[in-house]
Image (cartoon, rainbow, N blue to C red):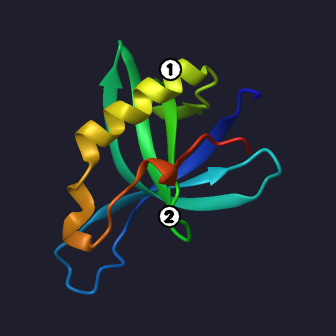
Amino acid sequence: MENNNHDHDHNHDHDCECGCHEHDTVKLTLEDDSEIECEVIGTFDLNEKNYIALLPVDDEDVLIYNFEDLDGELQLNTIEDEAEFEEVSAAFFELFDGVEEDEDEEYDEEDIEEDEE
């Protein structure tokens, strides 16, 4: 798998009709210049690295990236090492499983995929 760095725009999405939920979203620009909008599920640290979990708006598969803050801009990096990805996925489930239950969404391990785009 090759390293995929993605540029993105950060904005706030207010799709909820009731006005009581606020979701951060990012737009990922992929290598083929296509864009996907993703809801930010959350960020977490593991083994002195930062990770971000994203849920594409029109998909149920969670994307997890390593990220770095470069002068106020996020740089997303694909997790290339399989053992690291498994450890990060387990940490994601421990931290976020059930967080979205209020919105009738729950994430299963098969919903996590390595981004190979």
Crowdedness of circle 2 by 10 Å Cα count: few (<14), some, many (20+)?
some
Residue 71 visible in the shown view: no
Which residue is nearer to you in this view: 85 or 117? 85
Sequence-wise first label, 2 or 1: 2
The reply, left or right, for residue 79 in relation to residue 97 is right
Q: Is residue 113 above or below residue 58?
A: above
Q: Which mark is residue 25?
A: none
Q: Residue 52: percent from the left, percent from the top?
A: 42, 38
Task: Label 2, secondary structure: give it.
Answer: loop
**Residue that protrudes farthest toward the right in the picture:** 32
Residue at left 62%, top 31%? Answer: 78
Which residue is nearer to you in this view: 90 or 116? 90
Residue at left 46%, top 50%? Answer: 54
The residue indicated by pointer 1 is 84
Task: Label 1, secondary structure: give it.
Answer: helix
**Residue that protrudes farthest toward the top in the picture:** 48
Residue at left 30%, top 80%? Answer: 16
Question: CA separation, marks 2 and 1?
Answer: 22 Å
Q: Is residue 29 above or below residue 17?
A: above
Q: Mark 1 belongs to which amino acid?
A: Glu
Q: Residue 89: percent from the left, percent from the top?
A: 42, 35
Residue at left 49%, top 40%? Answer: 64
The reply, left or right, for residue 107 in relation to residue 9 is left
The reply, left or right, for residue 105 in relation to residue 29 is left
**Residue that protrudes farthest toward the bottom in the picture:** 17
The residue indicated by pointer 2 is 60
